[in-house]
Amino acid sequence: MDKHVQSLLQPRLPSVAATAKPKISTKSGLLRGAWEDGVQVFRGVPYSTPPIGDRRFRSPIPLQWEGERDATRSGPASYQINAGNREKVAAEIEAMDPGLPGDPLWPAYAAETYAQNNASEDCLYVDIWAPPAARTENLAVYVYYHGGANTASSGHFRLENAANLAREENIIVVRPTYRMGALGCVHFGLVSDRFPEAVNLGLQDQIAALKWVYENIEAFGGDRNNITVGGESAGATAVSPYCHPWG
């Protein structure tokens, strides 16, 4: 195996001086992260008030918290079919139309690969990876939107861990989770006056996450004026609106 490729596959441990839990003070509140594979990681950082209860089908709004927030665990994925609800969803479909034609969107192998068994409507969080000395530098920032046909996956999908990218390229990587499926893509605002904000909610979430990064990334050592957005599959589609002039 190529030595460079082999080095990328080897987990990196922080130095003795860097074993203390990293802490960051953002405009939203104080975060306590962890060291993973030689980089600082802050998981489950909320960029909006949870879109639940009275805030279901509402636009994202900033959230602030008191005290130190544990940022060592990722937040839930957007609600989606998984091992915990697959049979219930199938039964609901059968009850709506026993003769409904067609095949499942995801073949079995894809469903297993993208499985997000911790899923919830409360899903507006980002995970952040930063190199060890990030706060002493002014680093480029990469905001990556996940794929999954706007129905599956999350900003913490296990096969898209950003530790190597952050460490080897010396950049800060941010991965948002956003509303998908009916919660994020059905334009209820076009069919009912009850939900005037419910148009492109998933896209609104993506923009809200980007705004949060712009307003807070300097605390992590990032350059707010050097942010690149990218993504894969549905995540790449999410980037396209930013390629057009707004006015």
Image (cartoon, rainbow, N blue to C red):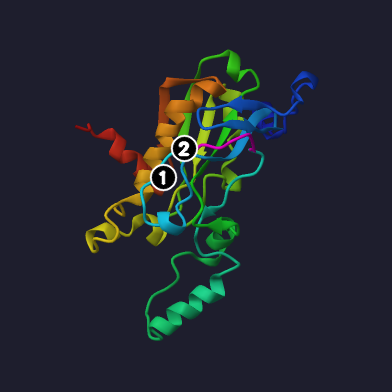
User: In the rendered image of this protein, does residue 1 appear above or below residue 238?
Assistant: above
Q: Looking at the picture, does residue 151 appear above or below residue 229?
A: below
**What element does badge 1 sit on?**
helix
Lateral position of residue 189 relative to residue 55, left or right: left
Residue 138: image location, x then y, percent: 51, 15
Lateral position of residue 238 relative to residue 178, left or right: left
Residue at image coords 56%, 14%: 137
Instruction: Specify the amino acid type for callout 1.
Output: Gly
Q: Which disc, if any, is residue 235? A: 1
In this picture, residue 138 sits left or right of residue 117 = left
Amino acid type assigned to the residue bearing label 2 in the image: Tyr
| Residue at point 29%, 39% (across, down) | 241
Where is residue 40 drawn, in percent x and y?
A: 65, 29
The secondary element bearing badge 2 is classed as strand
Residue tagged by mark 2?
144
Q: Which residue is drawn at 43% across and 40% down?
A: 231
Instruction: Read off the magenta span.
Output: 63-70
The answer, for residue 32, to whether it is visible in the render is: yes
Magenta-span inclusion, residue 67: yes
Residue 49 x %, y % = 47, 45
- Indicate whether residue 96 is drawn in magenta: no
Graded by Cα atoms within 10 Å as few (under 14), some (14 to 19) or many (20 or more), the crowding at tag 2 reads many
For residue 120, above or below residue 39: below
Q: Answer with mark 1 or mark 2, whichever residue precedes in sequence.
A: 2
Location of the N terminus (image quadrant): top right
Q: Quadrant of residue 229?
A: top left
